[in-house]
Structures are given as structure tokens and as C-alpha cells.
Amino acid sequence: MAELNKVILSEKDMPKEWYNIAADLPEPLPPIIRADGVPAGPADFAPVFPMEIIKQEVSTQKWIPIPDEVISAYKVWRPSPLCRAYNLEKRLKTPARIYYKNESVSAAGSHKLNTAIPQAYYNKAEGVKRMATETGAGQWGSAMSFATQFFGLKCTVYMVRVSFDQKPYRRFLMQTYGAEVFASPSNLTHAGQEVLKKDPKSLGSLGIAISEAVEDAATHDDTKYCLGSVLNHVCMHQTIIGLEIKKQMELIGDYPDIIAACVGGGSNFAGAVFPFVADKMKGKDIRFLAVEPAACPTLTKGPYRYDFGDEAKLMPLAKMYTLGHNFMPSGIHAGGLRYHGDSPIVSYLVNKKLVEARSYKQIPCFEAAVLFAKSEGLLPAPESSHAIRAAIDEAIICRETKKEKAIVINLSGHGHFDLSAYESYLSGKMVDVEFDEKDMDRCIKELPDIK
């Protein structure tokens, strides 16, 4: 096995196709349906998505060619490096080999640009003038703001209120890229107005922000909606991460025993692990750790049910693990993980026990992030700290059992705009929020009665 600190692919080795895991699943996914229980068709998605995105969403073609214009844009930062965390290994005194795929090198600072670029491209190609979207922590909003600027589109971002207040520098970055940014819930949409009537001090949620962005797109002829996670086409765009990991591990003669990634809607997790899932289904001994916040434990606490993707029920229903479309997560610092549901495919894989789900409170995650920063010099996003926590715990098990394993972390983004969160942790002000199961139970009772 080659001893390298960093594995960097050349541009010619960058994947030219996205991998569509739907082609390899043992059975079709439960369909996305309308509120009346009828499977949703292209006409149901057409008011908010361009036709090429709709085709990708329902495709079972295994390999989807990446357009030349998208590849050209990807080359601004891709391929991203796969790094060996030697210093972290030494601090942990573990025999484990710890790697991290550094997606923070993108122009927007996270993996989100992998899908923002193609979504902006396909909308531009169909004559769209403006994109409307939501953002939690601001990483998706930053990515979409840059991508729309790259293709000459306007961009409107509805940013979850708690993150709008906690993370002003991400808002400033979006505005620097030319986007309009509004705190959600806002008075600009009917969906936002209804929430504010009930709770004028609402912290907001991704479900609410999605409702606002969808309503914006559906009520303006020149505007379409774009989603940063959850749906199949988003997860597929992100598989460029895992495809690169495969090539990079092959170059050094290694293969992952464990891949860990954080989960909010599921896109960076899907991107890292989907290209390896087929190997597992063929008998390969590999584990996938989907790591979420204990304050919003969708995969570990929620039921596997049909639910709406947004609070106002404007979107169709998908079968997924959910806490209820009207669940209001606590204002934790990992704002990108405060989503009530999850990717239908990730949920399916968890349900089939091909993926392991676990949750952590935020203080242990920040403890892991600080240790990682001290060891490797890179400040992780609060979201990514969940994957780091899981990887460290697995590395400690390797130390205690004297077993050598290869652990890969998908480092989804940097935390340079999250220093107020780190200040909260370092000063001892941070608290671990307890999950309210009664609140979840109340929201679950309001789920549609669809099996």
C-alpha cells in the first residue's frame, strides 16, 4: 500500500458520468405520490423543475453522462483530494487508517456545488431566468448563489431564520455572489405568513424554507425551484465524490472498511457511499455510517412512512424516515442537518439494513471537530463534525481490539463561517439539546394515512 498524505487525481481522471443507484437496487423504490395517493408524474413536477431534472429523478439508467459544460465548471475545484489523517491517527494511537475526502475545497466551501452546477446548467438550458431555493446552514445557498452566477441566472434564497441569525457570514457570501437572501419564515410568501401568524418568533426549519421557495417558483413563470438534498437526482449528482474515492483508493492499493458521512437530507452521504453500495450487495464487507444530530434524529427515531417534503405540503409525498413535516427541530449549530425527513433512497437502504444510522449530541461532535482541527489543521463544518465523531469512535474501537481498518470520512465542508459556533463550544456556553419525543409523536399523528 502506497504511503501518501494526499491522493489527487488529474483532470483527465475525473468521472465523466454520474452513477444512478436506482439501476442496482433489488426492487423499485416506493413511488413519489400526490396527496391523493396517485403516483406523481412529470406534470406534477413541471411547475418547479426543468424537464431534464425530472427525467433524471425517475431514471433507472445506471450511468448518466455529465454535460461538457458541467465538467468544465467542475474543473474549477475537482477532482477533490483524498487525504490520510496521519496526525489524527497518532493522537488516537489507533491502528486504523483514517482518510478524509476534502469537499471543502470547492468555491462555495462544501460538496453542495456538485449538484448546484448541473441544476443551474439544466435550468439555463431550458430558458429559466431565476432560481428559488432554501438553505439551512447556508452551504447550499452559497453553492446555488455561485452556480447561478456562473450561468448568468438570478437567485433567491430563503435561509432558515436561526441560521440567518447565527451565520451572517454565509449570508454575506451569498449576497457577494449576487443572490437575494431572506430569513425564513418570511412575509414574502403565503407559506411564510401562515407560520408567522402561529409563531412570530419561529426559528424556521428547512421544511418551511422549502415551502417558501417552492411557492415562489410556482407563482413566477420565469422561475424554477432547486433542491440541495433528498431527491434522487441530487444524490446522483453527488456520486462524483464516491467515484473519485474509488479511484483514489485503488491508486494506493486500499479499500474502505467503513465510510462515515453526516446526514440531514442525505446528499453528501449518498455521494460518498452509493458507488460502494453495489459492492456490499455483492457480498463485500463494508459498513456505511449515516450520522445525524440527536436533536433531529430522523433515521434513528422516526418511522418509515410517506410524508411531505415541506411544511406547507406543496411538494409530493415520498416514503422516508420522518419526524413529521411540521416538526420544528431545535436551533443546533449544524443547521444543514435540521430536516424532518431524509432521502428516499438513503431511507430505503437504512430500512434494508444496508446502512447503519446513529446519532450524536452536538458537544461530542464539536469535541471531535476540535481534535480534528488540532491534528489536521482543517476546521470542519458543524455538519461534518458528526462524521468525524463516528470515525473517531470507530478508530478507538480499532485501538481497543487491535484491528486495522480503513475508515473514510466524507468531509462535506469547512467551518470558517461557523466560528461563532466554535466560540460557543470553547467558552463552555454550548448545551446539548434534548430531543422531545412527545413533540415528534404529535407530528407523527398528523402524517397522511398512506401505507
Image: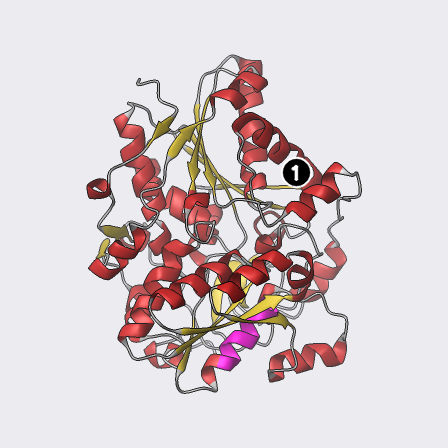
User: Magenta part of the protein: which range?
Assistant: 207-216
Q: Would you say residue 96 sits in the magenta stretch?
A: no
Q: Residue at x 39, y 67 (%)?
A: 149
Residue 383 visible from this viewpoint: yes
Vertical comparison of 208 with 375: above or below = below
Instruction: Residue at 39%, 80% (x, y): give it.
Output: 44
Residue at left offset 49%, top offset 74%: 315
Residue ID for mark 1: 366
Q: Is residue 397 above or below residue 143?
A: above
Q: Is residue 354 left or right of residue 382?
A: left
Left or right, 316 with respect to 60, comes to right
Q: Inspect the image, locate mark 1, and give the three-letter code of the amino acid beneath it.
A: Phe
Residue 291, percent across and down? Answer: 55, 42
Where is residue 155 drawn, in percent x and y? 46, 72
Q: Nearer the viewer, residue 341 or 408?
A: 408
Examine the image and state in which quarter residue 1 appears: top left
Query: What SS does tag 1 mark?
Result: helix
In this rendering, the count of numbered labels is 1
Q: Is residue 294 visible?
A: no
Residue 209 is a magenta residue:
yes
Identify which residue, 62 or 349, lies in the foreground.
Answer: 62
Toward the viewer: 21 or 161? Answer: 161
